[in-house]
Image (cartoon, rainbow, N blue to C red):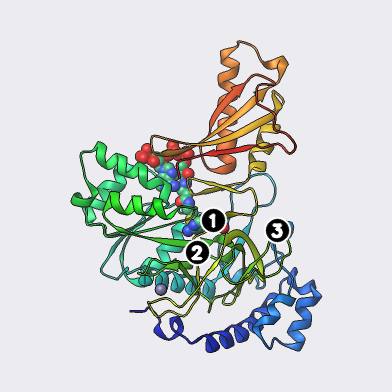
Amino acid sequence: MYWEKEIETLDRKSLEKLQVDRLTGTLGQAVKSSYYGRISEITDFVESGIKSIEQISELPFTTKEDLRNNFPWGFLTTGKKEVIRLHSSSGTTGNPIVVYHNRHDINSWANLMARSLFAAGVRDTDVFQNICGYGLFTGGLGFQYGIEKLGCLSIPAGAGNSLRQIKLMRDFGTTVVHAIPSYLGRLYDVFKAEGLDPRKDTNLHTFVVGAEPHTEEHRQRIEEMFGVKAYNSFGLSEMNGPGVAFECKEQNGLHIWEDAYIVEIIDPKTLLPVADGEIGELVMTTLDRQAMPLIRYRTRDLTRFLPDQCECGRTHRRIDRISGRTDDMIIIKGCNIFPMQIEKVIMKLSEVGDDYRIILETVDSQDVIIVEVEVKKDWFSGDTTFFDKLKKRLTHLIRDEVLVSPVVKLVEPGSIPKSEGKAVRVFDCRKK
Ligand code: COA
Ligand code: AMP
Ligand code: ZN
């Protein structure tokens, strides 16, 4: 069963031809932006035309830095009037990453979402609870539009308040949940504390989990705890958000939608394609986006192509679950954080020294971010009021910057162990 049988099962030759046609259109659209309009390798192709998909390798990459450096409008190809929504990364210092969508883009994203959910077995008879941040996070509205397109009864629950989540599930007979995997341990604990067993006391049959790395073992634990099937959902805001790659009922890797994206996997050092099946950095080109097409975007996510066609009949290739990143971005509670964001906040305060470290831990099934900060010698006294105030101030500032509440620990100058060579700032001790 398919959402769009013809496109999902298109033979590879026709799929490639479709990609070439759409790439031609995408380049024509991209050069309307001030950024791509001044890149001669792209404007030349618009004149000469793309003849084969291999020619993608002659185009330049686009990076997060390019997006930041051309903030706010450098990648926009249309008038502002045509844009109907933007999504943006967190951060109050420096330029955030912003992605713009016109009506076509939102419709096409909703369709990819509906297609993805349908592939995982979600149907219009389901009651779908989306336990994910709305607002500027793409997992909120991204899923919402897809669920509605599919025709499920949607419960836009948002993140947080586990007791209420459980009540919603029981009141309305939720059958499908979308949430980040690390939150589900906490949700299960709250079920237990209420004397409830999700296997018996709910109608849940399917979970959609994503937005952060997780292992096959973690998936299995979730499936056992809740008595559901859990399907991996991958996406990133620069490529819309969720709906980029999704597991089908076979649960054997994620189909990446090749009518909407050209997908490459490169060696991050040489920038050349890796051999088939080897792990490398995922690079993506949008094929169906008008307001902000992106060409050869370096996602920084590490994965590999999986061999063989899937039993489900879909011809779009599958990627393996994401195994890491080529930059220092960390994801906690579904929020993306660059250590530099925290450093910038800390360094604003004159009472604080130069050393800090970030420790990620799992406490009572919940991930926490601990920020240890050295206080300057002159300020390090036994004055508890001063310490409390400083801690509060830092907690607020960091929370505003990264959207997660940290546990701030103020420590004596010189007490943070020095690492040899480049300072190691992040210690990830979370239960995987
Ligand atoms: N999803 C859903 N609920 C979450 C969560 C997550 N990722 N992370 C924590 N929570 C819950 C906690 O369990 C707690 O509720 P409970 O005590 O009733 O169980 C509540 O949110 C607050 O948790 P706390 O750890 O005190 O919050 P915080 O101040 O650090 O901020 C969030 C937490 C949830 C508000 C913030 O991390 C967030 O918005 N995360 C969602 C991000 C997201 O959806 N990303 C996906 C993008 S596609
Ligand atoms: P955002 O742009 O906030 O949606 O974050 C996107 C990033 O989250 C991706 O680039 C990945 O690093 C990570 N991510 C999203 N989905 C998954 C997933 N299913 N598995 C692992 N990492 C994921
Ligand atoms: Zn499949």
Check whether the beta carbons of the residues at disc 3 and disc 2 lie within 8 A of each other.
no
Query: Residue 299 appears in which quarter of the rendering?
Result: bottom right
- Would residue 44 be found to the left or right of residue 210 on screen? right
Instruction: Name the amino acid, label 3.
Output: Phe
Q: Is residue 291 above or below residue 187?
A: below
Badge 2 density bin: few <14, some 14–19, many ≥20, Cα 10 Å:
some
Up-down: is 286 above or below 13?
A: above
Q: Is residue 227 left or right of residue 352?
A: left
| Numbered badge on residue 196 | none
> What numbered label is drawn on residue 323?
1
- Kindly identify which residue carries mark 3: 71
Which image quarter: residue 160? Answer: top left
Tell me whether the residue at label 2 lies in contact with that at label 1, contact meaning CB atoms closer than 8 angstroms: yes
- The residue depicted at 29 percent of the width and 71 percent of the height is 124
User: Can residue 256 be seen at all in this image of the molecule?
Assistant: yes
Mark 3 to mark 2: distance in Å? Answer: 32 Å
**Residue at the spot of label 2:** 320
Given residues 58 and 274, the one toward you in this image is 274
Counting from the top left corner in percent of width and height, residue 267 is at 67, 64
